[in-house]
Image (cartoon, rainbow, N blue to C red):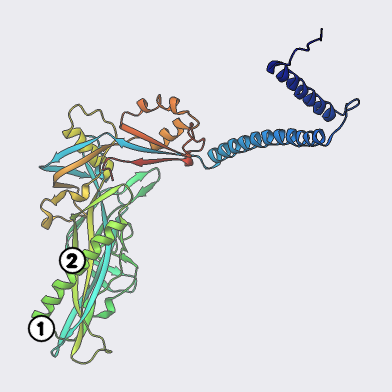
Amino acid sequence: MKDISPKKTASAKDSSLGDKKTSRASEIEEIYRGNNVGYKTTKASTDDWSRAVARRPMRKKWLWLGGSVVVAVAFVMFLVGAVFGKATLIITPKQGDLILSGVEDANKRSLASSTASVLTYDTISKVEDSEKRIVKASGEEKVEKKAEGKIVVYNKNTVTQKLVANTRFQATNGKIYRLVSAVTIPAGKKSGSTVNPGSVEVVVLADKVGPDYNIGLTDFTIPGFAGSAKFKTIYGRSKTEMTGGFSGLVRKISQADLDKNRTELQKLLRDRLIKKAGQDVPVGYVLFSDAVKIKYEDRVVNDPSLPADKAYVSVQASLSGIIFKRDELSMYFAQKLIPNYDGSPVEIDNFNKLEFALQNKDILDLEKTTKISFSLDGTGHVVWLFDQAKLKKGLLGKSRAEAEKVWPEFTAIERVKTVFFPPWLWTFPKKETRIVIEIDGGVK
C-alpha cells in the first residue's frame, strides 16, 4: 500500500506564514540591535531595518517637541499674566434721587465750622477781566476824575478805633486821600510783649482830580493823629494802586452808543468771568452761576492812534462769588432728606443741573457779609462713595474666590463686574496700578 501524505490545511498554512513573519520581525530587531549573526541579510530585510531605524528617533523627536511647545506656551501665558495682567472693576455704587427745594442758610467758614446740620461757605474775589470796542465819537468834552484805590488800615492798640467818612490818609509822597465810608478798626490782640494789629480794608478817594494822584503801592499815615501816640499805632498800607485820576478833554460818545456798547461788553465779560472763575475754583468746590456778583466800570478812552471821530469804550469787570465744598453740601442735604442716613460719605454729582438762587443778592457785599440765604431746586442725583485705594489694596494678589469676601466690606457698592486681562488670569495683580476702577450706573 502507498503511504498517503495528509494535505496541509489552511490553518497550517497561516501558521507557517505567521512563523515566517515573526521570524522576519525578530531578524529586523536583531539587526537593529547589531546582533545579525546567523541571519541571512536580504535586500528586503535591510530596507525594513532602515525604515525601523529612521522611524524610532522621529517618534522621540516629535514627543519631545510637543512637550516643549506645551511648556513654552504655558510659560508665555504665565509671563503675559504676570507682566501685563490687569483687572478692571466695573462698579455700580449705591445711588438715588433727592428732591431739593426751599431756602437754606449758610455761614462764612472763617466764622463757623461746618457740620451735618450747619452749612458753611467760602468766597472768591478779584477775578478780573476787561474789554474795549471802537465806537463813533461826536466832538469832545472835559472830564475830571479822582484817583481811587484800596488800603488796609491797621490798629496796634488794644481797643477799637472809629474813623469817620472823609478821614484823611497821607501817602509818603504827600498826596492826600480820603476815606469813602466810616469804619471801625478792630483792636489789636496782645501776644506776650507784642501786639498783633487789628485790620480792615477800606476804599479811599484822592483829595483832588488829575493824574498826579495815580500812584503805586505805598504806606499812609493819618494827619489827624499827628502829635499823639496813635500817629504811629494806626496807619495804612496799599492794597491796590491808586488809579483813575484824570483831567482833560475826551472824545464824546452819544449816550445811546455808550449804553448799547456798555450792555454788550458787560454781557461778554460776565460770560467770560463766570467761565474763568469756574476754572479757578479749587478742587472739591462748586460755584453756581447765580452765586456771583460782578462790578463794572466803564469809561471812554482817548487813543491818539485812532481817527478823530473814533474812540474806545472800555469796560473793566471784577467778580466775587460764593463757593461751597461739594462733600459738605452733599452730606448736608443727605442728612436732611435721606431717612435713617448713617453719615456715610455721599456726593450729589449733578449740581450743574440744579437751580441756585442767592437771596437778597442786590444788597449783598459778598466780600463783607458773613451769612447768606439761598435756594437750591431740582432733583439731585446722590451717589454713595467708597475708598477706592482701600478696595484696590484689599484685592492685591487675591484669587477670584477670595475677592468675594472683600466686597461685603464696602457697603456703598451695589454691584461689581470684574474683567481680567488676559482672560485666563485667575488672581488679581499684585500692583495697585494694574487694578482699574470704572464707575457705572449713570454716575459722572
Q: SS of the residue at dot 2?
A: loop
Q: Nearer the viewer, residue 399 or 334?
A: 399
Q: Nearer the viewer, residue 381 or 336?
A: 381
On the image, the x and y values in percent for residue 396 come to 48, 32
Name which quarter of the figure residue 209 lies in. Answer: bottom left
Q: Residue furthest bottom?
A: 308
Q: Quadrant of the N terminus?
A: top right
Q: Is residue 188 above or below residue 39?
A: below
Exactly how many numbered labels are in the figure?
A: 2
Mark 2: amino acid: Asn
Q: Residue, x 73% and y 35% (percent of image)?
A: 55
User: Could you tell me how far apart the alpha carbons at marks 1 and 2 are, in whole angstroms?
Assistant: 34 Å
> Depth check: 121 or 201 in front?
121
Q: Which residue is mark 2?
A: 166
Residue at 14% in and 55% down: 364
Disc 2 crowd, CA 10 A, few/some/many (<14, 14-19, 20+): some
Mark 1 and mark 2 in contact? Answer it, CB < 8 Å. Answer: no
Q: Which mark identifies residue 254?
A: 1
User: Is residue 308 rendered to the left or right of residue 75?
Assistant: left
As drawn, the residue found furthest toward the front would be: 1
Looking at marks 1 and 2 on the same chain, the residue that comes earlier in the sequence is marked by 2
Q: Is residue 173 above or below residue 408?
A: below
Residue at the extreme top of the image, as rendered = 1
Compared across the picture, whether 359 is left or right of 321 comes to left
Query: What is the secondary structure assignment of the residue under circle 1?
Result: loop
x%, y% of residue 390? 42, 33
Q: Residue at x 35, y 68 (%)?
A: 218
Of discs 1 and 2, which sits in the foreground? 1
Q: Amino acid at mark 1?
A: Ser
Q: In the figure, is residue 194 to the left or right of 33?
A: left
Residue 92 makes an appearance in the image: yes
Q: x%, y% of residue 384?
A: 28, 35
